[in-house]
Image (cartoon, rainbow, N blue to C red):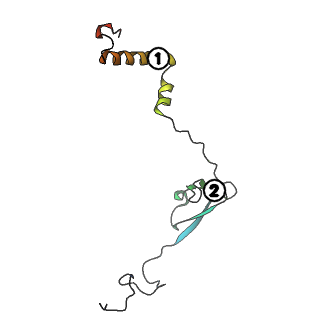
């Protein structure tokens, strides 16, 4: 199986020599450095004509996951995150112990009626 042409296998059709700069337009850009609390620097590039107020002051550092700011000497502090709350924790915030006991007793009574453990006419609710 002879292949016609001198293209290197796996190269893109129409690709010119490596390093050829005649393809595409290169927009002016500005490099902005961000630092996290561990001292890691991350550089992001933005269009040179982008207004300064549209360039973010804080990003998430890809190396540490910490917030990173533009001031090297004063990186942003890690914000305190709320621990995950279970459904039961939210319910306990809304109900007192007395309300919870009353609701539990009502639910158990309904369950016992459905299972035939107590007659339906003895329901107090």
Name the quarter where the N terminus is drawn. Answer: bottom left
The percent position of residue 20, horizontal first and vertical second, equals 46, 85
- Front-most of residues 61 and 76: 61
Q: Residue furthest right?
A: 73
Q: Residues within 10 Å of mark 1 (few under 14, many from 20)?
A: few
**Left or right: where 73 falls relative to 9:** right
Which one is nearer the viewer's eye here, 87 or 37? 87
Q: Which residue corresponds to the image point at 48% horizontal and 22% vertical from the top-left?
A: 95
The residue to which callout 1 is attached is 101
Q: What residue lies at 50% left-to-right and 25% top-to-bottom?
A: 92
Q: Residue at x 36, y 84 (%)?
A: 14
Check disc 2 and report the residue beneath it: 36
Q: Quadrant of residue 53?
A: bottom right
Residue 22 in the image: x percent, y percent?
44, 84
Q: Is residue 18 above or below residue 72?
A: below
Q: Secondary structure at mark 1?
A: helix
Q: Nearer the viewer, residue 27 or 36?
A: 36
As displayed, is residue 16 above or below residue 86?
below
Q: Secondary structure at mark 2?
A: loop
Name the spot of residue 15 as percent of width and height, x first: 39, 84
Which one is in front in this view, the residue at disc 1 or the one at disc 2? 1
How far apart marks 1 and 2 lie (CA) works out to 49 Å
Residue 23: % across, % down: 42, 81
Instruction: Count residues near mark 2 (Cα–Cα under 10 Å), then give few for <14, some for 14-19, many for 20+.
Output: many
Q: Nearer the viewer, residue 8 or 48?
A: 8
Q: Is residue 37 left or right of residue 107?
A: right
Q: Is residue 1 left or right of residue 67?
A: left
Question: Which is nearer the N-term, disc 1 or disc 2?
Answer: 2
Query: Tag count in the figure?
Result: 2
In percent of the image, x 33 and y 7: which residue is there?
Answer: 122
Q: Quadrant of the C terminus?
A: top left
């Amino acid at each position: 199986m002879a292949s016609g042409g001198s293209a290197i296998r796996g190269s893109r059709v129409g690709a010119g020599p490596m390093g050829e700069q005649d393809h595409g337009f290169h927009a002016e850009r500005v490099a902005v450095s961000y630092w996290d609390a561990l001292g890691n620097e991350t550089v992001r590039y933005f269009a040179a004509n982008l207004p300064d107020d549209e360039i973010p002051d804080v990003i998430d550092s890809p190396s540490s996951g910490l917030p990173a700011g533009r001031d090297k000497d004063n990186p942003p502090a890690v914000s305190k995150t709320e621990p995950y709350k279970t459904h039961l924790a939210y319910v306990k915030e809304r109900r007192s112990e007395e309300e919870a006991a009353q609701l539990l007793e009502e639910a158990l009574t309904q369950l016992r009626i459905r299972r035939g453990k107590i007659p339906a006419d003895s329901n107090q609710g």
